[in-house]
Image (cartoon, coloured by chain):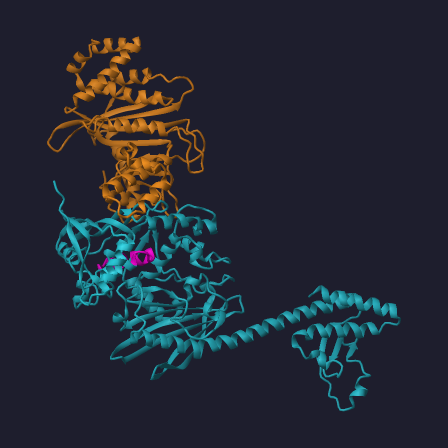
């Protein structure tokens, strides 16, 4: 029997995307399948990567499924102009979820990881089922580039052969409702990368085992790893990156005892909406959740230790070209139990009815901690559209133009787009058109907030914090010196005092006085920092503690009766001073 | 079941989605469910149905469990001029990077890769080959199941690749197959030759045949009771392979039951459970052949009479296994089996 195959017809722009997308991250491709399931009112999506051999891949959901007609329409010029975009519905029927996929690209995104796959759909609406095999064209990368080049030279949107498919009807079974995708034809480039990078498997690095993760918590533990968190996901395997990428991208609940942002009322509402969606994603038997832990630092501070302590409205001027407006954010101070560090959590909200003629509304949060956030993949800005992350965290803060040194690495934020932005999204649904007015407005908002509120605050807080730390350290060093001084000299001294005695007499008479007074009864040594002999020595502040000790050692040695005893005591005290440096 | 040391059992199965055998071993404590994530360790399976493959893997809850493909095809992979050019997993991987490869060649290479992977997963302490197919199907696929068992007995001699360095001294193999009136003449000829050779080499065997079947004329025996002839000859085939690979075979159980096919055609499912031990001396296949010859050693499993004491015990026992299996199915949001 001859096999009957039908061509898959794509528009040139979709083909171009496909060609460019071949080597994008696997998470970006698989995310599209999850979005499809979300839109199909599925409760559970199960993805199996075939770890650690990566020889098969499957994704199944229990949603409403896809009808044969819809499938055929997509295969015949329908991709890029999805029904979901044509339909006036903006939310799903059962769970009223905001629709994510609007271009019908979900299925073809698989082309990035495989060359051929089978899809089985049991459609609840029509009570029909079909099975189809999809074969992508065996183009080489070079051939695809040539086709894309030829197409870009043309003005009209040409139709391109994008592979072929074969469809068979199946008996509908309500128990099997939903879509199942299965393939053993994984691209070797994908498979090889997943396999070879397993030498950096986080479970092995952190817990010393090559076994699959037992739970998602264990996986996150291997990434955040207590006092030794992974610095960057690039340092762990592609499989770890895939898990993180999917968990981050999908509309999933936050882990409440790991992410302090849930303490914000706005985020609690969001969490409750996410929970009401009743949507779960399992990858390799791990039930995913939002993988971000805040705070996440080397000191191992956790959300459980953090409390919001007082809030304050902070205003700033948003400048977007000629447009200027006063915006505000609510700053919440975050105290940390059993620690003197203080973090900041900003609650953000913005609405404007006319940004280049259309509405733009977003809210979100910005968290700022003391010290770097780990892994670096949660530093920066993440934009979510319809609850789905678009791309990754932008470490450049949407191309922030000023140099702020390490302060960049202390900030993690999420922006949730409520209105607008649809047209700002590129066809790959993984990046934005950075010239779109909505993107530019959000970018300006972020830059103004960072520049006028967050970074100056960070600077002054950091200064205060550093000064306090320096003072504390100096105090500790001084009491150590006093202790040693006592032991060496036998004097009953408890502290060193600094005074600045007023000087009216001629400098020559002052030169005869000692700048140090030993007050045995009070147990004090008094240093006159206004003494003409000492003044030049205190010009460099950072040497002041050392100078004081040297002066005390010299003056105290002079109290000895003979030159050898003076010498002996002086060198002993010098030894104590320098043993601490 | 006895294993040489205290390590956990390594189990290979063709369990299908019901997974009764797996949960029976869980119930017996031979396989362990991890209380943290409910995964069942050290179980491997082979399955060619993609829906069942995904479901079984999820029920086992270990992503590294399972091989996709039909066991006979995978195990009996034969080189051709094309695949012979790629002798290692690395060379196969390199070739697979050529995305313009014809589908037929691609399939051959993928099959070879799975063949390597399945082979390197051996040996196992317990192998359950519930083929549910003809042991001797019609040509051209004749003897494929038979050959598969033969190859597996060879692979059971391997030292494990997984760092445990398991070097088996004994293991248990359960093989199931189907027999009916369509039994092909080619297969019959093969069995006739095996039994004739037994009679020639072992006077004891010949005596037993004469005593119990009233003739040593095999054609006469076949004419009188073809099914009995099959039951007597089949285990001998496995014993012959075992001898070749240095395994001494001891039949533990030989059971069968009758069923009717879609066209109301009767057939028999026979199940042989045997222990294989390393033998320093040349193993003797006459004892298992004599065991199979003795009708008393074959246990017929009749339809269960639910009213009888034994029937109730069987249903209760099966009920416990199904309950354990369904508990896992609920955890994994998979369809449950009906209560027996």
Question: Vertical placement of A491 versus B304: above or below?
Answer: below
A93 and B237: which is toward the camera: B237
The spot of residue B152 in percent (x, y) is 33, 29
The spot of residue A390 in percent (x, y) is 32, 65
Query: Main structural element of the magenta stretch: helix, strand or loop?
Result: helix
Task: Report if residue B249 is visible in the image.
Answer: no
The residue drawn where x is 21% and y is 52% is: A179
Residue lying farthest right?
A: A562
A141 and A536: which is toward the camera: A141
Task: Report if residue A53 is visible in the image.
Answer: yes
Residue lying farthest left?
A: B263
Q: Is residue A356 left or right of residue B119?
A: left
- The quadrant the N terminus of chain A occupies is top left
Q: Is residue A107 left or right of residue A346?
A: left
Question: Vertical placement of A553 versus B149: above or below?
Answer: below
Chain B shade in the render: orange
A126 and A30: which is toward the camera: A30
Q: Which residues are magenta?
A: A21-43
The spot of residue A184 in percent (x, y) is 27, 45
The spot of residue B57 in percent (x, y) is 31, 44
Q: Is residue A129 left or right of residue A549?
A: left
Q: Which chain is cyan?
A: A
- The quadrant the C terminus of chain A occupies is bottom right
Question: Vertical placement of B217 versus B85: above or below?
Answer: above
The residue drawn where x is 24% and y is 44% is: B102
Is A22 in the magenta? yes
Image quadrant of residue B275? Answer: top left
Image quadrant of residue B311? Answer: top left
The residue drawn where x is 22% and y is 9% is: B216
């Amino acid at each position: 029997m001859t096999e009957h195959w039908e061509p898959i017809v794509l528009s040139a722009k979709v083909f171009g995307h496909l060609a460019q997308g071949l080597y994008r991250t696997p998470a970006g491709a698989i995310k599209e399948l999850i979005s499809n399931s979300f839109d199909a009112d599925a409760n559970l999506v199960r993805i199996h990567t075939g770890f650690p051999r990566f020889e098969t891949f499957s994704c199944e959901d229990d949603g409403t499924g896809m009808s044969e007609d819809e499938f055929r329409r997509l295969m015949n010029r329908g991709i890029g102009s999805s029904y979901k975009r044509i339909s006036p519905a903006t939310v799903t029927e059962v769970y009223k979820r905001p629709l994510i996929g609007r271009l019908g690209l979900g299925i073809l995104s698989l082309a990035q990881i495989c060359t051929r796959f089978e899809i089985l759909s049991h459609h609840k609406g029509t009570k029909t089922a079909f099975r189809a095999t999809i074969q992508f064209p065996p183009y080489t990368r070079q051939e695809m580039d040539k086709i894309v080049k030829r197409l870009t030279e043309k003005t009209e949107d040409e139709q391109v052969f994008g592979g072929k498919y074969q469809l068979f009807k199946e008996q509908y079974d309500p128990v099997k409702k939903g879509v199942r995708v299965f393939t053993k034809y994984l691209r070797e480039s994908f498979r090889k990368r997943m396999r070879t990078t397993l030498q950096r498997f986080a479970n092995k690095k952190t817990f010393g085992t090559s076994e699959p993760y037992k739970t998602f918590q264990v996986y996150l533990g291997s990434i955040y790893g207590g006092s030794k968190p992974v610095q960057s996901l690039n340092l762990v395997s592609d499989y770890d990156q895939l898990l993180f990428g999917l968990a981050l991208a999908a509309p999933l609940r936050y882990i409440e005892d790991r992410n302090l942002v849930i303490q914000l009322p706005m985020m609690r509402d969001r969490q409750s909406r996410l929970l009401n969606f009743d949507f779960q994603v399992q990858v390799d038997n791990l039930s995913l959740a939002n993988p971000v832990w805040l705070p996440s630092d080397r000191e191992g501070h956790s959300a459980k230790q953090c409390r919001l302590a007082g809030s304050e409205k902070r205003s700033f001027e948003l400048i977007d070209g000629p447009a200027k407006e006063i915006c505000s954010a609510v700053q919440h101070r975050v105290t940390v139990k059993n620690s003197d560090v203080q973090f900041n959590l900003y609650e953000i909200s913005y609405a404007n009815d006319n940004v280049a003629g259309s509405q733009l509304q977003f809210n979100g949060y910005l968290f700022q901690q003391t010290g770097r956030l780990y892994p670096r993949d949660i530093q920066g800005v993440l934009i979510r559209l319809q609850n789905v992350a678009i791309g990754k965290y932008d470490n450049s803060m949407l191309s922030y133009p000023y140099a702020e040194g390490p302060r960049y690495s202390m900030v993690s934020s999420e922006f949730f787009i409520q209105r607008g932005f649809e047209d700002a999204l590129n066809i790959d649904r993984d990046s934005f058109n950075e010239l779109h007015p909505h993107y530019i407005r959000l970018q300006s908002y972020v830059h103004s907030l960072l520049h006028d509120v967050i970074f100056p605050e960070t600077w002054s807080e950091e200064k205060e914090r550093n000064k306090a730390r320096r003072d504390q350290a100096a105090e500790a060093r001084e009491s150590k010196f006093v202790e040693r001084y006592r032991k060496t000299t036998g004097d009953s001294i408890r502290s060193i005092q600094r005074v600045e005695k007023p000087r009216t007499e001629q400098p020559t008479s002052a030169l005869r006085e000692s700048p140090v007074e030993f007050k045995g009864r009070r147990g004090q040594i008094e240093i006159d920092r206004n003494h003409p002999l000492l003044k030049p020595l205190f010009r460099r502040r950072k040497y002041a503690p050392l100078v004081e000790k040297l002066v005390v050692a010299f003056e105290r040695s002079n109290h000895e009766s003979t030159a050898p005893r003076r010498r002996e005591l002086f060198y002993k005290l010098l030894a104590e001073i320098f043993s601490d440096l | 079941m006895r294993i040489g040391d205290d390590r956990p059992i390594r189990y290979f199965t063709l369990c299908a989605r019901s997974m009764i055998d797996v949960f029976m071993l869980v119930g017996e404590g031979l396989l362990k469910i991890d209380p943290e994530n409910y995964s069942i360790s050290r179980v491997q399976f082979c399955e060619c149905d993609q829906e069942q493959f995904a479901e079984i893997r999820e029920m086992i809850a270990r992503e590294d469990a399972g091989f996709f493909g039909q066991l006979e095809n995978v195990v009996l992979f034969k080189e051709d001029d094309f695949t012979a050019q790629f002798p290692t997993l690395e060379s196969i991987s390199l070739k697979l990077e050529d995305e313009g490869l014809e589908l037929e060649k691609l399939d051959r290479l993928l099959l070879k890769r799975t063949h390597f992977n399945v082979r390197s997963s051996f040996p196992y302490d317990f192998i359950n080959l519930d083929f549910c197919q003809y042991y001797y199907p019609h040509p051209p696929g004749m003897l494929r199941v038979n050959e598969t068992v033969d190859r597996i007995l060879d692979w059971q001699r391997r030292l494990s690749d997984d760092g445990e360095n398991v070097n088996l001294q004994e293991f248990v193999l359960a093989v199931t197959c189907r027999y009916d009136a369509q039994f092909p003449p080619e297969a019959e000829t093969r069995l006739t030759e095996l039994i004739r050779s037994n009679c020639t080499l072992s006077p004891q065997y010949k005596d037993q045949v004469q005593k119990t079947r009233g003739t040593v004329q095999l054609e006469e025996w076949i004419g009188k009771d073809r099914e009995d002839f099959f039951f007597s000859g089949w285990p001998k085939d496995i014993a012959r392979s075992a001898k070749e690979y240095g395994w001494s075979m001891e039949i533990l159980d030989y059971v069968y039951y009758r069923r009717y096919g879609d066209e109301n055609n009767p057939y028999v499912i026979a199940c042989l459970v045997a222990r294989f031990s390393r033998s320093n001396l040349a193993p003797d296949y006459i004892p298992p052949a004599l065991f199979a010859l003795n009708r008393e050693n074959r246990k017929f499993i009749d339809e269960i009479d639910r009213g009888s004491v034994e029937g109730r015990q069987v249903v209760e026992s099966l009920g416990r296994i199904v309950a354990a299996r369904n508990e896992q199915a609920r955890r994994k949001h998979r369809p449950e089996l009906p209560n027996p």
